[in-house]
């Protein structure tokens, strides 16, 4: 009995050792959590820019955010309806002027630096006496498209504002796929978000941080985006707008400015507390609106929503259309709707609203998105017709508050006070009656505002639990192999012990087993191996 117990203990040790070897150097059983890319871009075709300086700083009507002695720079922007907004920058010495998309949803400043069939002009570092290379390669993938480039630094100037010249990080794009657009006249992208999402890592200082650190400009900028809503076949009509660097221009908005807090300094990540149609809530858990973030992004045209929110909004809109046939394919974004010029029945479509968390806990304010905003003009190439598509789209990377919303409001990115502000834009009032816009009243109480924040740490905890569960399942899946292996070894060891016991009865200690027995054991082993 004692010897049998010893053999059982040895077998247990063997199983433990074998299990350790399996996990350290054998069977691969693991949980793979895919990395996500976060950029979803839509590019534009043309840019018309002028730059002028504003004489004085502007202070919002609720609290001081600026030093009035610091300068402001106003850059007029342009583009094509629904395709983005651009400014012009001078790069290098002497300056090479390029048209650049203003993008609050990314952080890299990247420009074409090599000939490309779809680019009319590009940055030539060797023609700049102030260019310095870092010899660091950068790769940025988007949902559609990607580019590779080489990181360097050079002097960057906002034309007509010599005090704006600073040395900044620039990625020269030398190869790309589905990034540049055939027939367009833009040559790069200017990321205005925080350095934490810069590529290849957060050590790359974004352009705006360099501008604030290298000049007396305040850490704040604001944007007015303007697009006509009835264009017909006049494709030469441009979007317009304004970008104020270092402050706020009071001539570009009416009424009160409302602010929402930036949750985290990476994107301009805010909190949506509710969403609805014609004043009626979609009645979803407010965390759904912020899964896994909600960002303000001038580089995206549509209001992009998490899939559950998007489906609920589309079904609600479809059920509230009055006296107008709208096919489901329109709401899905796969079909245009066209009307005779000047006869678009905007008044038959409902108004969508978006509530944002206020500057204090348990407060919110409302942004309305009238149909003149979310029914976006596109060139349908139909003579005498205005053609449109929906300005809503689904997203796998959270809520993206794009130009569809921003075109109704003057938007302030107040980085030094960690907030984003919204006030009704004067250019939106020129095409949509002001009564359709909010904020048309003051901040309102909202007891759910704190509960709407999507906490990524909760998600991480869930992933940890899931990983442990899957690891346990992996162990259970290979446990029968260990048991069979241990059983087989224990059986052979027991046979050997019996053989040793027989030798004490007068048989030679090293006498080989009977050939028939040996062949039989080999056959058993082969049979078991095949079953495994």
Image (cartoon, helix red, strand yellow):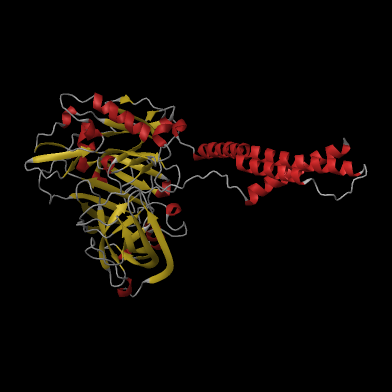
Where is the N terminus found, in terms of image quarters? top right
Could you tell me residue 204's position as x and y percent? 44, 60
**Residue at left 30%, top 46%?**
300
| In-front residue for pair 248/427 | 427
The answer to which quarter of the image holds residue 31 is top right
Residue at the far left: name it: 384
Q: How many marks?
A: 0
| In-front residue for pair 191/462 | 462
The answer to which quarter of the image holds residue 461 is top right
**Residue at left 32%, top 31%?**
311
Please indicate, yes or no, whether residue 516 appears anywhere in the rendered image.
yes
**Residue at left 31%, top 44%?**
411
Could you tell me residue 285's position as x and y percent? 42, 28
Where is the C terminus found, in terms of image quarters? top right
**Residue at left 32%, top 74%?**
126
Could you tell me residue 79's position as x and y percent? 21, 52
Could you tell me residue 24's position as x and y percent? 64, 50
- In the image, is 100 to the left or to the right of 212? left
Please indicate, yes or no, whether residue 441 appears anywhere in the rendered image.
no
| In-front residue for pair 255/86 | 86
- In the image, is 418 to the left or to the right of 23? left
């Amino acid at each position: 009995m004692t010897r049998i117990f010893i053999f059982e203990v040895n077998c247990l040790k063997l199983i433990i050792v074998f299990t350790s070897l399996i996990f350290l150097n054998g069977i691969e059983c693991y949980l793979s959590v895919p990395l996500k890319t976060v950029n979803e871009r839509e590019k534009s075709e043309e840019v018309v820019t002028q730059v002028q300086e504003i004489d004085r700083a502007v202070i919002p009507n609720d609290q001081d955010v600026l030093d009035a002695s610091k300068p402001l720079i106003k850059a007029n922007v342009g583009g094509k309806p629904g395709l983005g907004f651009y400014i012009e920058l001078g790069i290098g010495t002497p300056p090479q002027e390029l048209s650049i998309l203003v993008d609050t949803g990314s952080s890299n400043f990247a420009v074409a630096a090599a000939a490309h069939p779809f680019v009319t002009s590009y940055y030539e570092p060797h023609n700049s006496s102030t260019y310095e290379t870092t010899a660091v390669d950068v790769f940025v993938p988007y949902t559609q498209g990607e580019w590779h480039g080489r990181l360097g630094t050079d002097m960057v100037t906002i034309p007509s504002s010599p005090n704006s010249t600073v040395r900044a990080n620039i990625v020269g794009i030398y190869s790309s796929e589905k990034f540049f657009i055939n027939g367009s006249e833009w040559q790069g992208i200017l990321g205005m978000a925080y350095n934490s999402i810069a590529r290849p890592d957060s050590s790359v200082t974004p352009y705006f941080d360099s501008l604030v650190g290298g000049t007396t400009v305040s850490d704040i900028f604001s944007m007015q985006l303007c697009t006509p809503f009835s264009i017909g076949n006049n494709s030469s009509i441009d979007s317009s707008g304004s970008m104020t660097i270092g402050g706020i221009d009071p001539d570009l908005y009416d009424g009160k400015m409302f602010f929402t807090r930036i949750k985290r300094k990476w994107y301009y990540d805010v909190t949506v507390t509710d969403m609805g149609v014609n004043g009626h809530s979609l009645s979803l858990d407010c965390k759904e609106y912020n899964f896994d973030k909600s960002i303000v992004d001038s580089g995206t045209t549509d209001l992009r929503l998490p899939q559950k929110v998007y489906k609920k909004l589309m079904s609600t809109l479809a059920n509230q259309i009055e006296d107008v046939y709208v096919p489901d394919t329109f709401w899905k974004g796969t079909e245009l709707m066209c009307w005779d010029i000047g006869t678009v029945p905007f008044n038959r479509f409902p108004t969508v609203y978006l509530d944002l968390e206020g500057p204090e806990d348990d407060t919110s304010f409302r942004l309305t998105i009238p149909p003149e905003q979310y029914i976006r003009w596109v060139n349908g190439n139909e003579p005498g017709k205005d053609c449109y598509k929906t300005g809503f789209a689904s997203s796998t990377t959270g809520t993206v508050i794009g130009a569809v919303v921003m075109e109704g409001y003057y938007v302030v990115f107040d980085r030094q006070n960690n907030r984003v502000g919204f006030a009704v834009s004067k250019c939106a009032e020129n095409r949509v009656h002001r009564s359709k816009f909010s904020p048309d009243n003051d901040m309102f109480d909202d007891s759910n505002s704190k509960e709407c924040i999507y906490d990524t740490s909760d998600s991480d905890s869930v992933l940890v639990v899931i990983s442990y569960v899957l690891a346990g399942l992996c162990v259970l899946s290979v446990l029968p192999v260990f048991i069979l292996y241990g059983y087989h070894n224990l059986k052979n060891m027991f046979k050997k012990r019996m053989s040793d016991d027989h030798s004490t009865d007068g048989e030679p200690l090293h006498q080989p087993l009977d050939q028939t027995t040996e062949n039989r054991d080999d056959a058993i082993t082969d049979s078991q191996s095949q079953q495994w």
